[in-house]
Image (tube, rainbow, N blue to C red):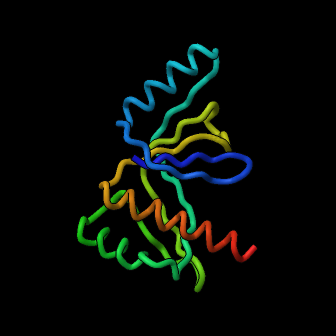
């Protein structure tokens, strides 16, 4: 499963070897014990990848072969593509800007998406 954590400082992505149901259950227990609200709802999340990041064509081919309906890759401009994933949004409020988004893909798709995102972060950091 891929876990995207949205904070005031940006996006952090990681692979988690835990079923979605278990992660949500842990979050619910934590929220109850902390006396906080918790909203879990289906949705989608998007992030940018560099259009020239090595491995992007491999991801796009794999998504076509898998006939993957959970991930789409859309060109934005000459420099970036937008990756949109279907999954679940977990946050303290319905309209929260901070929270966690989780999605389950094939192991290879998760691996490729994470590696491409990390490579894009390195490229963007290098250029800044």
Q: Vertically, is 41 above or below 68?
A: above
Question: How many labels were placed on the picture?
Answer: 0
In this rendering, would 47 be left or right of 20?
Answer: right
91 up-or-down from 110: above or below: above
- Residue 66 falls left or right of residue 83: left
Q: Residue at x 31, y 68 (%)?
A: 63
Quarter of the image containing the C terminus?
A: bottom right
Judge left or right: residue 7 versus residue 109.
right
For the point 44% across and 70% down, the residue is 73
Image position, residue 102 (x, y; %): 46, 44
Task: Return the x and y of residue 92 as percentages of the image width and height.
Answer: 63, 31
Residue 78: name its quadrant.
bottom right
Residue 7 image offset from top left, x and y in percent? 68, 46
Q: Estimate the x, y position of residue 58 in percent, counting from the top left.
A: 35, 76
Q: Residue at x 61, y 66 (%)?
A: 121
Hey, which residue is sitting farthest bottom in the picture? 78
């Amino acid at each position: 499963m891929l876990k995207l954590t949205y904070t005031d400082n940006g996006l952090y992505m990681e692979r988690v070897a835990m079923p979605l149901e278990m992660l949500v259950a842990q979050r619910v227990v934590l929220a109850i014990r902390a006396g906080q609200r918790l909203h879990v709802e289906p949705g989608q999340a998007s992030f940018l990848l560099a259009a020239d990041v090595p491995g992007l064509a491999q991801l796009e081919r794999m998504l076509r072969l898998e006939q993957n309906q959970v991930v789409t890759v859309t060109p934005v401009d000459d420099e970036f593509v937008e990756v949109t994933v279907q999954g679940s949004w977990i946050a303290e409020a319905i309209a929260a800007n901070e929270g966690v988004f989780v999605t389950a893909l094939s192991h290879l798709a998760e691996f490729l998406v994470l590696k491409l995102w990390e490579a894009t972060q390195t490229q963007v950091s290098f250029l800044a």
